[in-house]
Image (cartoon, rainbow, N blue to C red):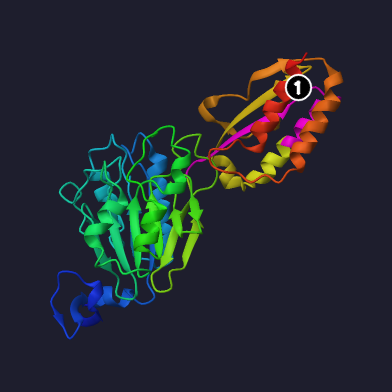
């Protein structure tokens, strides 16, 4: 309960900007309710929500609300949003004002991203909302680390902006919160956004030494443990290319433990390709392949109702109609993305069983290799598909 009383809290002077100092300490006045919440404080973090008109994409709003309900149950009263809270076609924020009013015990700390670079507190009215439209170094009173909130700006790198704040960015004692491209993330440009957006380089990390970096912009959750750079990822897949379970993060501001939490997303996308070639028992082979896919998804009944799937079959078959019917029956109970049934447009008819042994040996050899998925490099399934196509093109 907020008694309206106030207390004085002393925190190290170097973390507080634009305040007078007394004997190297700043006097910070906080309300009792806020002060008590600082103890061993945890902060939730998300990004790339891409909210639109609520009627257009209700699943994105509902997923964000699921996160807010979850952190409220965990007694967390702050959430950082690392850019692209809104999609670029969203210019009315009244629905978001209603949301922040509903969760008025949670503080929303927001930086603009490349899709919502012009959002500000002029348009968003919630008293529990702070939007960092300019770079700012702030602190939380229980933490020995400062936070550098760096909003997205076009035609500039993150490192170029560090220069003006280097006195406040004490090596290994600050956390970067921003929105843009990390050096390792731009090896495979986003096909929707092929340009480079406010990049952060390894040299920037080496020169300014943030102890932790949390970014928005890349929708796929990524963790570069070598440099302690993390993309929290979009909490709700925007389309069929953003597959699998999504997450948000919780940061303990005292010890910097970063915990990733599975999001109760309103939609979960899966996009799978199955390679096929003529064999004595195609049904049994397909049955095993589909079973492995479902095992990898590992969906409970509630998640299954939220799943949207796309299935593509590629290769060669002696009975394409039978293949199609079997595949459709195997995925009964699932919702197909855009109501598309399994795609067999790249399955070709072939009765050449003489190539079966060659194909089996090649696929087995590929399976024996140790495959590590690297962004921008073909995955094992794609290599198998190319190999099969090469073998059967001989005939």
Question: Measured along the vertical axis of the image, is residue 329 above or below residue 222?
Answer: above
Q: Residue at x 49, y 41 (%)?
A: 267
Which quarter shows the N terminus?
bottom left
Q: Residue at x 35, y 70 (%)?
A: 173
> Observer-nearest residue: 14 or 59?
14
- For label 1, count other residues whose C-alpha is less than 10 Å away and answer few (under 14), some (14-19) or many (20+): some
Residue 22 included in the magenta stretch of the image: no
> Observer-nearest residue: 334 or 384?
384
> Observer-nearest residue: 39 or 25?
25
Residue 19, percent across and down?
A: 14, 73
At mark 1, the secondary structure is: helix
Magenta range is 266-289
Left or right of 127: which side holds 275?
right
> Residue beneath label 1, please?
391
Q: Residue at x 36, y 77 (%)?
A: 39
> Observer-nearest residue: 237 or 224?
224
Residue 296, percent across and down?
A: 66, 45
Q: Residue at x 77, y 24 (%)?
A: 277
On the image, which quarter does residue 283 sit in?
Answer: top right
Residue 278 included in the magenta stretch of the image: yes
């Amino acid at each position: 309960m907020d008694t309206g009383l106030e207390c004085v809290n002393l925190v190290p002077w170097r973390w507080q900007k634009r305040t007078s100092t007394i004997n190297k300490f700043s006097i910070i006045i906080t309300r009792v309710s806020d002060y008590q919440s600082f103890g061993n404080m945890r902060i939730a973090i998300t990004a790339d929500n891409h909210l639109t008109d609520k009627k257009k994409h209700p699943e994105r709003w509902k997923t964000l609300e699921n996160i807010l309900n979850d952190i409220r149950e965990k007694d967390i009263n702050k959430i950082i949003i690392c850019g692209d809270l809104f999609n670029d076609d969203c210019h009315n924020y009244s629905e978001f004002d209603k949301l922040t009013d509903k969760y008025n015990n949670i503080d929303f700390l927001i930086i603009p991203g490349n899709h919502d670079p012009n959002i500000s507190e002029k348009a968003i009215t919630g008293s529990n909302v702070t939007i960092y439209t300019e770079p700012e170094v702030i602190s939380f009173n229980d933490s020995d680390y400062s936070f550098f909130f760096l909003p997205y700006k076009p035609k500039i790198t993150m490192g170029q902006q560090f220069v003006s704040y280097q006195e406040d960015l004490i090596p290994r004692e600050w956390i970067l919160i921003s929105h843009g491209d990390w050096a390792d993330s731009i090896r495979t440009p986003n096909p929707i956004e092929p340009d480079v957006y406010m990049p952060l380089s390894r040299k920037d990390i080496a020169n300014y030494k943030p102890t932790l970096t949390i970014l928005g912009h890349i929708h796929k959750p990524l963790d570069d443990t070598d440099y302690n750079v993390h993309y929290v990822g979009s909490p709700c897949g925007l389309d069929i290319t953003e597959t699998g379970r999504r997450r948000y993060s919780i940061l303990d501001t005292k010890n910097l433990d970063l915990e990733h939490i599975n999001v109760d997303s309103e939609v979960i996308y899966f996009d799978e390709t199955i390679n096929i070639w003529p064999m004595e028992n195609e049904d049994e082979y397909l049955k095993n392949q589909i079973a492995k896919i479902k095992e990898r998804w590992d969906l409970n009944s509630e998640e299954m109702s939220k799943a949207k799937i796309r299935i593509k079959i590629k290769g060669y078959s002696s009975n394409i109609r039978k293949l199609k019917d079997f595949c459709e029956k195997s995925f009964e109970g699932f919702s197909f993305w855009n109501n598309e049934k399994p795609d067999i447009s790249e399955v070709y008819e072939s009765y050449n069983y003489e190539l079966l042994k060659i194909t089996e040996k090649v696929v087995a050899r590929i399976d024996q290799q140790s495959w590590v998925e690297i962004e921008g490099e073909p995955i094992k399934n794609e290599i198998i598909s190319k190999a099969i196509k090469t073998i059967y093109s001989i005939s």
